Amino acid sequence: MATMSATAFAQSEEWAVQAMKKYKEKDYGACADLFERSFAEKSQYFVDDMTLERNLYSASCCLALAGRGEAAAARLEKAIENPAFVGYDHMMKDQDLTVLHNSQNWEFVLKAAKAAMQARSPITYPSLDRESAKKNPPLFPREAMKADASGIVVLVVTVGADASPKKILIEQSSGDELLDSAAAETAKTWQYRPGVAKDGTRFSGRVRVPIEFRRNRKF
């Protein structure tokens, strides 16, 4: 499991970020190509189901807007197969996918999406086991206490389908490396809950956890 700063993205994750920038700039061809690079390299880091589903859907929109309907349908089908997919209603109204409406596969895609929704919704999203966190609060580092340090660390924990923490990202630093490290190390020991679909399928996702360090304050 990795602990990293907000700037330490793997290359594949960075490509997904750049793809969304191109999407906002309406450079749909470049957006689609960057997403394809990201998918090709996804084995280099842990991709949670919720993020992958979102990226697959966004890639489908970029491909559709770029006039690459067949490839768009293929990516949309992959998004629907993802256990975190619950976007049937949005997909029905999404004008970015208009080019697919007249395709031969559209009815098939709709049926698959509807079946997926019926099987998975409602779902429980990944979460932190708060009792586990309360029983094992982060220790205030002695050196940081001597320096009268304080602050809030915001972690993003990638929770696997097996409920284990796969990756811990320091999204917001407290401004003190000792506090940041104490928060991240403790988060590795906590228990988590994976996402669970209506049909019992477990899926991975990200949980945002703020931790405040302040003297004489209970966790």
Image (spheres, rainbow, N blue to C red):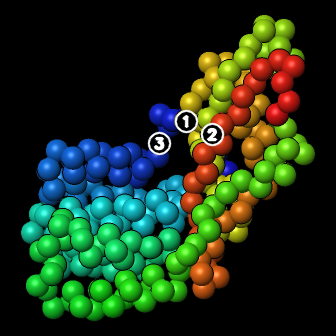
Q: Amino acid at mark 2?
A: Leu
Q: CA distance from mark 1 to mark 2?
A: 6 Å
Q: Label 2's element?
A: strand
Q: Is residue 180 left or right of residue 189?
A: left
Instruction: Mark 1 and mark 2 in contact? Answer it, CB < 8 Å.
Output: yes
**Position above or below: 133 against 217:** below
Q: Which mark is residue 155?
A: 2
- Residue labelled with disc 3: 9
Q: Nearer the viewer, residue 217 or 29?
A: 217
Mark closer to the chain start, 1 or 2 = 2
User: Which residue is rendered at x = 60% and y = 85% of the image?
Assistant: 199
Q: CA distance from mark 3 to mark 2?
A: 14 Å
Q: Is residue 8 visible?
A: yes
**Position above or below: 88 against 40:** below
Mark closer to the chain start, 3 or 2 = 3
Could you tell me residue 95's position as x and y percent? 17, 67
Q: Is residue 69 left or right of residue 121?
A: left
Q: Is residue 3 visible?
A: no
Instruction: Mark 3 and mark 2 in contact? Answer it, CB < 8 Å.
Output: no
- Residue labelled with disc 1: 171
Could you tell me residue 51's position as x and y percent? 46, 59
Q: Residue 198 sits in which quadrant?
A: bottom right
**Position above or below: 111 against 146:** below
